[in-house]
Amino acid sequence: MAISEEEIEKYVKAGKIASDAIKFGISILKEGELAEKVADDVENFIIKRGAGLAFPVNLSINDEAAHYTPDRNDKRIFNRNDIVKLDLGTHIEGYIADTAVTVEIGKESNSSLSRASETALKNVMISLRPGIRIGEIGKIIENSINFFGFKPIYNLTGHQLKKYILHAGLSIPNYDDGTSSTIEVGMAFAIEPFATNGEGFVRESRFGNIMQIIKEDDDTKNVYEKFKTLPFCTRWIYNDFPMPERVIDRLLKSKNVYKFPILKEKKKGMVSQFEHTFVVTGDRIYVTTL
């Protein structure tokens, strides 16, 4: 699978902006701050730096593992000791960077739960090479998290990236599921270890304000032209479309729109997450979001 220098440059540029956006997001995640303001500020930071938004900024809290982004006029605030997963995505002409960190509100340093997922990601980075089995990556993640006394989230995975496609092809589990597929030159993918003090599985909860168009039709045409195949959220509709309530209503009723549920730990365990994007070339492996 060949990858051109031009494609690599776009992946790297998207990754640099994503890395800077994560640092900015960490700096504004404070006790008492509105989640909506943080999401808006981070998204505006990305846009001002010259990248597109690959998906809405996720700010999943405590037992929420993924897919919470604030709605318009959302009153949710961050409280002391909240475990916040700041997960964001950028793209340059469709070439995506996906990255995440865990921030524990009001603490100078993270707990062992957060260190478990962070260490798992670092251990993968040390071991990653072309030809490594996907299941071996999962084994590294699980062993790293188990070392801290926690469990990985077994039904969440990392994922391959392709132009304008956030979840493409291979999935990269947080344990060895026996997959024999391997990492190959030319691939771009995100690896995202999730650790928990709960059961190790997530369940679907309420709608998390994020949607994705599966197929263009009369109800989705205008929105598809704006966001294509990438996820978007209700907040953005208010900014980009006239009569936003009507647009959102049609999207929610459409069978050609996927509505992302908030994913919560099955036994209400706390969840941590760290994530980087990788691009494999013949010469090196780029960690674009470092």
Image: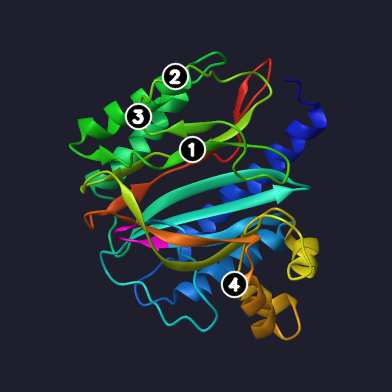
- Is residue 57 positioned above or below 187 on the image? below
Which quadrant does the N terminus fall into? top right
- Mark 2 or 3, nearer chain start: 2
Mark 1 to mark 4 CA distance (whole Å): 27 Å
Q: Amino acid at mark 4?
A: Leu
Residue identifier under label 3: 175
Which quadrant does the C terminus fall into? top right
Mark 4 to mark 3 CA distance (whole Å): 34 Å
Mark 4 to mark 2 CA distance (whole Å): 43 Å
Residue identifier under label 4: 252
x 29%, y 50%: residue: 110
Q: Which mark is residue 127?
A: 2
Q: Which mark is residue 158?
A: 1
Q: In the structure shown, which secondary structural element does the residue marked by tag 3 occupy? A: loop
Q: Nearest the camera: 36 or 171?
A: 171
| Front: mark 4 or 3 | 4
| Front: mark 1 or 2 | 1
Indicate whether residue 67 is drawn in magenta.
no
Drawn side of residue 125 relative to residue 44, left or right: left
Residue 139 occupies which quadrant of the picture?
A: top left
Q: In the structure shown, which secondary structural element does the residue marked by tag 2 occupy? A: helix
Q: Which mark is residue 229?
A: none
| Range drawn in magenta | 60-64
**Residue 93: percent from left, percent from top:** 79, 47
- Mark 3 or 1, nearer chain start: 1
Q: In the structure shown, which secondary structural element does the residue marked by tag 4 occupy? A: helix
Q: Amino acid at mark 1?
A: Gly
x 65%, y 59%: residue: 46
- The reply to whether dot 1 and dot 2 touch (C-beta < 8 Å) is no
